[in-house]
């Protein structure tokens, strides 16, 4: 689809980027495989043994299996809940609010970013299902790709500044921190990270700017590509006709007894979790989140047959997650565990380069740049923080830089590569039925604006904070 004179200049640029991405950007699995090849060559170039590199590939390949299954259940749980009668009616009510395609894209953006501050998994699934509901309104003339990109803004812009920030959660909970990090940073409470007024300014700026970009880059009605143009059938989302038992052996499938038993057991476990942990910590755990969603979905469907049918419809959407996450596990293992001839890994060499040239005035800019670059190859919020923290926080201490803001530098910069990295995009792509290249043309425009804005704000706001020594538990 080519831009027209009715599109804004921003929309014309976004459409050209989208057209370029659709033509030249590979499938996300190919993208991950190319990244794997790049880090393998980097390891060999620093003198790593080929056998060590191959061993790290194999060892890391299955290292993300628990997380892979968690992400798959994010999709399944979201589908199960959203396909229930009550949730479908809520999404449909929201979908009736916009009056045109651009306002629909803006609605998706604000819903995605708001939800991500509570839980990033929720933002992916709920915003994706809202896009599908909006796409069923053909009179909106909404560009399905632009709306999908807006649904990703929660994870691509602000998630790490909210309550589900992995780094902030780790630093506030000494029992979760490795001793190697705790001895450097001490305990850093939320009041020194995500609840700083400087964090609020940064968050507000990103939400407003992201929303404006989503709105102005959405194609006009005559150049918009709807779901059908993208090869996606959103009209099949309607709940199937409820079947009735035809034989005695099926009666339990159509009785709520088993659902009520499961929900009662899950409720007992959830009560224990929330009574023994802070509420924010409990809900931020993916296991808790997924169990809560699955059981809520089962209860909303009421009968096992309806619940199982919803799960069956959801499973095909997890294909990308299941086949690609092992490659990312290998990438992380090669970067962090394979040592070159000098005894250091690729990740260590990158971090050392940035930390050696940093000063108090340039710390925010250099650490933000470093975190964004490394995040492109190791897209894991909490896991990557464990890799980075010993280096970057030691430098922060040496330079007398505010430790809490150092965590926020990581949080804000870590989200930047998400805008064009398919890793976390995969669950959303499964919901939407699209490929990464369909969204990246629009998210790339966000990246062009976010990168200088984030780095500037990190530097300017960091200058307003004074250093305080680590507080040990």
Image (cartoon, helix red, strand yellow):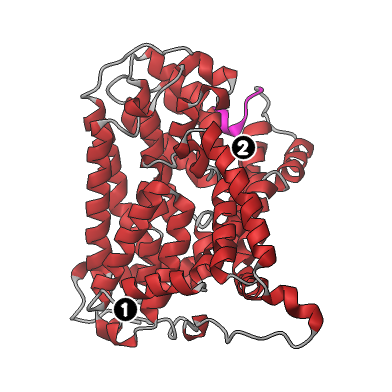
Circles 1 and 2 in contact, beta carbons < 8 Å: no
Q: Estimate how packed mark 2 is, as few (under 14), some (14 to 19) or many (20 or more) residues with alpha carbons within 10 Å.
A: many
Residue for point 39% across, 63% down: 151
Residue for point 51% across, 54% down: 424
Is residue 163 one of those drawn in magenta?
no
Q: Is residue 329 above or below residue 260?
A: above
Which label sits on residue 112? Answer: none
Could you tell me which secondary element the residue under label 2 belongs to? helix
Determine which residue is flagged by label 2: 335
Q: Nearer the viewer, mark 1 or mark 2?
A: 1
Q: Which residues are magenta?
A: 343-348
Residue 42 place in picture, x, y as percent: 61, 40
**In the depicted view, which residue is nearer to us: 114 or 326?**
114
Tell me the quadrant of the picture where the N terminus can be found: bottom left
Residue 375 place in picture, x, y as percent: 49, 42
Q: Is residue 339 visible?
A: yes
Distance CA(mark 1)–CA(mark 2): 41 Å
Could you tell me which secondary element the residue under label 1 belongs to? loop
Q: Estimate how packed mark 1 is, as few (under 14), some (14 to 19) or many (20 or more) residues with alpha carbons within 10 Å.
A: many
Residue 393 place in picture, x, y as percent: 44, 21
Determine which residue is flagged by label 1: 142
């Amino acid at each position: 689809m080519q831009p027209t004179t009715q599109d804004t200049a921003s929309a014309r640029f976004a459409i050209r980027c989208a057209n370029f991405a659709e033509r030249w950007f590979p499938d996300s699995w190919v993208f991950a495989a190319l990244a794997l090849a790049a880090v393998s060559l980097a390891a060999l170039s620093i003198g790593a043994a080929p056998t060590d590199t191959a061993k790290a590939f194999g060892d890391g390949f299955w290292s993300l299996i628990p997380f892979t299954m968690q992400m798959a259940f994010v999709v399944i749980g979201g589908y199960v809940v959203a396909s229930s009668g009550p949730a479908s009616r809520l999404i449909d009510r929201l979908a009736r609010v916009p009056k045109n395609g651009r306002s629909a894209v803006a609605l998706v953006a604000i819903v995605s970013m708001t939800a991500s501050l509570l839980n990033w998994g929720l933002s992916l699934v709920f915003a994706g299902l809202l896009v599908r509901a909006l796409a069923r309104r053909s009179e909106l003339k909404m560009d399905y790709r632009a709306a999908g990109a807006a649904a990703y803004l929660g994870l691509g812009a602000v998630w790490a500044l909210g309550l589900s920030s992995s780094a902030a959660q780790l630093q506030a909970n000494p029992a979760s921190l490795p001793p190697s990090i705790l001895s450097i940073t001490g305990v850093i409470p939320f009041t020194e990270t995500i609840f700083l007024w400087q964090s609020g300014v940064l968050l507000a700026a990103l939400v407003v700017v992201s929303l404006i970009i989503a709105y102005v880059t959405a194609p006009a009605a005559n150049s918009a590509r709807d779901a059908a143009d993208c090869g996606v059938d959103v009209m099949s989302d309607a709940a199937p006709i409820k079947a009735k038992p035809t034989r005695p052996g099926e009666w339990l499938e159509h009785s709520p007894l088993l659902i009520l038993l499961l929900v009662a057991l899950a409720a007992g476990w959830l009560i224990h979790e929330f009574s023994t942990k802070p509420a924010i910590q409990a809900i931020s755990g993916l296991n808790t989140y997924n169990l809560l969603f699955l059981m809520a979905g089962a209860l909303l469907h009421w009968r096992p047959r309806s619940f199982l049918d919803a799960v069956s419809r959801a499973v095909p959407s997890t294909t990308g997650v299941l086949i690609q996450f092992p490659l990312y596990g290998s990438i992380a293992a090669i970067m962090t565990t394979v040592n070159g001839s000098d005894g250091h890994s690729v990740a260590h060499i990158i971090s050392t380069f940035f930390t050696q040239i940093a000063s108090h005035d340039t710390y925010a800019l250099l650490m933000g740049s470093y975190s964004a670059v490394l995040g492109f190859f190791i897209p894991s919020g909490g896991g990557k923080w464990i890799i980075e923290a010993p280096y970057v926080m030691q430098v922060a201490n040496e330079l007398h830089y505010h430790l809490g803001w150092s965590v926020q530098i990581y949080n804000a910069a870590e989200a930047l590569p998400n805008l064009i990295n398919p890793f976390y995009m995969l669950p959303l792509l499964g919901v939407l039925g699209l490929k990464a290249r369909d969204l990246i043309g629009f998210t790339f425009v966000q990246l062009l604006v976010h990168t200088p804005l984030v780095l500037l704000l990190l530097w300017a706001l960091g200058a307003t904070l004074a250093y305080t020594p680590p507080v040990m538990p």
